[in-house]
Amino acid sequence: MVGEIRIENVYKKFPNTDPTKEDVQTLNGLSLKVEAGSFVSLIGPSGCGKSTLLRIIGGLDKATEGKLYIDDQEIKKPGSDRGFAFQGSNLFPWLTVEKNIAFGLKARHVYKERKGDVEDFIKLVGLEGFEKSYPHQLSGGMQQRASLARALVGHPSVLLLDEPLGALDAFTRMNLQDEILNIWKKHNMTMIMVTHDVDEAIYMSDKVVVMSARPSKVEAIIDIDLPRPRARAQDTFQEYRTRILNVLNLGGQINDVEYYL
């Protein structure tokens, strides 16, 4: 199985907007292994570097120090082995659903031989009949479905999800959680998701990685040992929720809360 991610002692600094001050350190020697075919969620305080870490895994940004590997190959740039879905759909507004999903295949000059994949993934995410629609003609949930199809059509071994459901209403969000899990099971890929929703992390993940406040490191890795599909109201689910909130220092006794704008 492919799609194993190894993160070894990664540091990330950003230049301070005030040149008289030190650079802002976001990641502080962070190490993590994500097993091939697993579903892992990253959760932690706002501004701790969750999305930064995801971008570095995707090759969209570079670590200041440390190394990252996918299947023993060092990550130095973006690649077709990694798909990316963002909080906003990031669809091209001037392209139809069909053309948005096909965009990556055309950019890689493989559209002719992979044209059937576009239709397959349109069906997979439930957008049949909307192939010729433009993004502004779709609901938020449908836009996210199209964004997922665009990320998946290249058959990546790793799908990186940066709060892909954060802007959706509760019912649409829960429906799409199940859609993503169905895609994960069907295609046996590795998924790494950034979320601020503890319940979402427990419902979807094999492991929840809790990151500390900035400069960030791994505070805890919690294996979610619950059968699927998971019942959000069951006692064990709530026990996991309490455990994660306690690690985040939000279990009922809040001390020294930090805010990042």
Image: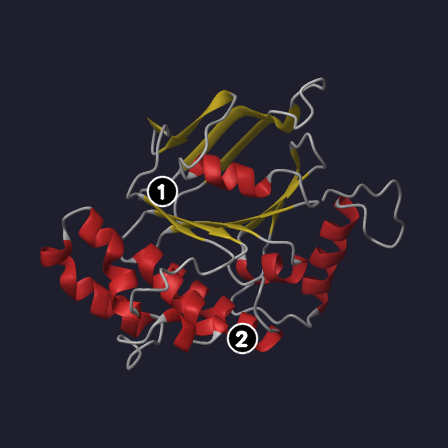
Tell me residue 233's x, y (percent): 69, 72
Front label number (2 vs 1): 2
Residue 31 x/y as whole percent: 55, 29
Quadrant location of the C terminus in the rendered image: top right
Label 2 vs 1, first from the N-terminus: 1
Task: Identify the image quadrant of the N terminus.
Answer: top left
Residue designated by label 1: 3
214 in relation to 102, above or below = above
Residue 182 picture location, percent across and down: 40, 67
Q: Secondary structure at mark 1?
A: loop
Query: What residue lies at 31% left-to-right and 78% top-to-bottom?
Result: 130
Q: Where is 194 relative to 7, above or below?
A: below
Residue for point 55% across, 70% down: 173
Q: Which residue is mark 2?
A: 172
The amino acid at mark 1 is: Gly
Dot 2: what SS? helix
The image quarter in which residue 68 lies: top left
Q: Amino acid at mark 2?
A: Thr
The residue closer to the viewer here, 13 or 121, is 13
